[in-house]
Image: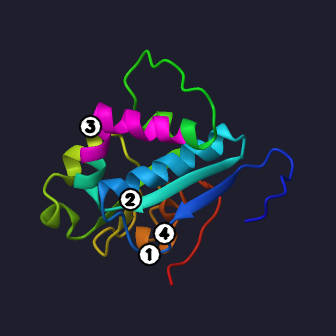
Amino acid sequence: LSRKHKGTRQRYVRIHASGDFYSKEYMGKWLTIALASKLKGLDFIFSAYTKSFSILEDLLSNQEKLKKVYEDAYNLVKIDIPVLSKKLSIEDFNIHFIASVMDDTYIMYPSAQRIIKKYDLPIYNVTSQNNGNCVKCGDTKMPCVSCMKCYTYPMQDIVTKLR
C-alpha cells in the first residue's frame, strides 16, 4: 500500500491472503493494529475472512480481553485512553470479520451459525451447492463461487478470482 493519501478514498487492508487466526492473542494483535491505524488518522479499513469462530467468540465475548486490546491500541499511538461508558464490540475496532462458509462449515464448526448470527457477520459463501440466488447480490445466473462479490466485502464494487 502506498502511504500517500489520494483524496478521500478509503483503502482496504485484507488480513491474510490465505490462512486464518490461530489464537486469540494473534487476533487481538490485529484488532490493536486496526484500531491504532484509525487513531493515527490513517484511512485504512481492515477486513478478514475467518473460520476461527471459537477464537472470535472467545475474544469478543470477554469484555476484559477487549478492553485490554482497546487500551493497547491507545497506548501504541500514545493517546489518552477515553473512559469507556459502554460495552466494547466489533464496531469499536477498525476491522470487518467475514465468515467463510464452505460446504462443511456447519458440520466442522457446530457453533458457527450461532456465532455468525450473534455478531451479525457478513458471510462469504464458497459452496458448490449454491447454484445462484446469491444472498449478497441476488444474482440468479451464476453460482456464488463464480460471482466473488462476497469475497471482496466491504469493497463492494470489486470482483476478484481465487488463485
The kind of residue tagged 2 is Tyr
Q: In front of the other: label 1 or label 2?
A: 2
Q: Which residue is mark 3?
A: 61
Q: Nearer the viewer, residue 11 or 100?
A: 11
Residue ID at (32%, 40%)? 60
Scheme by which the image is coloured: rainbow
What residue occupies the far bottom of the structure in this picture? 163
Q: Is any part of residue 44 visible from this angle?
A: yes
Span shown in magenta: 58-73
Nearest to N terminus: mark 3 or mark 4? 4
Q: For residue 83: magenta?
A: no
Q: Residues within 10 Å of mark 2 (few under 14, many from 20)?
A: few
Q: Which residue is mark 1?
A: 18
Under circle 3, the secondary element is loop
The kind of residue tagged 3 is Ser
Q: For residue 60: magenta?
A: yes
Nearest to N terminus: mark 1 or mark 3? 1
Q: Which residue is mark 2?
A: 26
Tell me whether circle 4 and circle 1 mark residues in contact (CB < 8 Å). Answer: yes
Q: Relative to residue 12, is residue 121 drawn left or right?
A: left
- Image quadrant where one finds the N terminus: bottom right
Q: Is the residue 117 above or below the residue 124 in the image? A: above
Distance in Å between CA atoms under marks 2 and 4: 12 Å
Q: Relative to residue 52, is residue 108 drawn left or right?
A: left
Q: Which residue is mark 4?
A: 16
Nearest to N terminus: mark 3 or mark 2? 2
The kind of residue tagged 1 is Ser
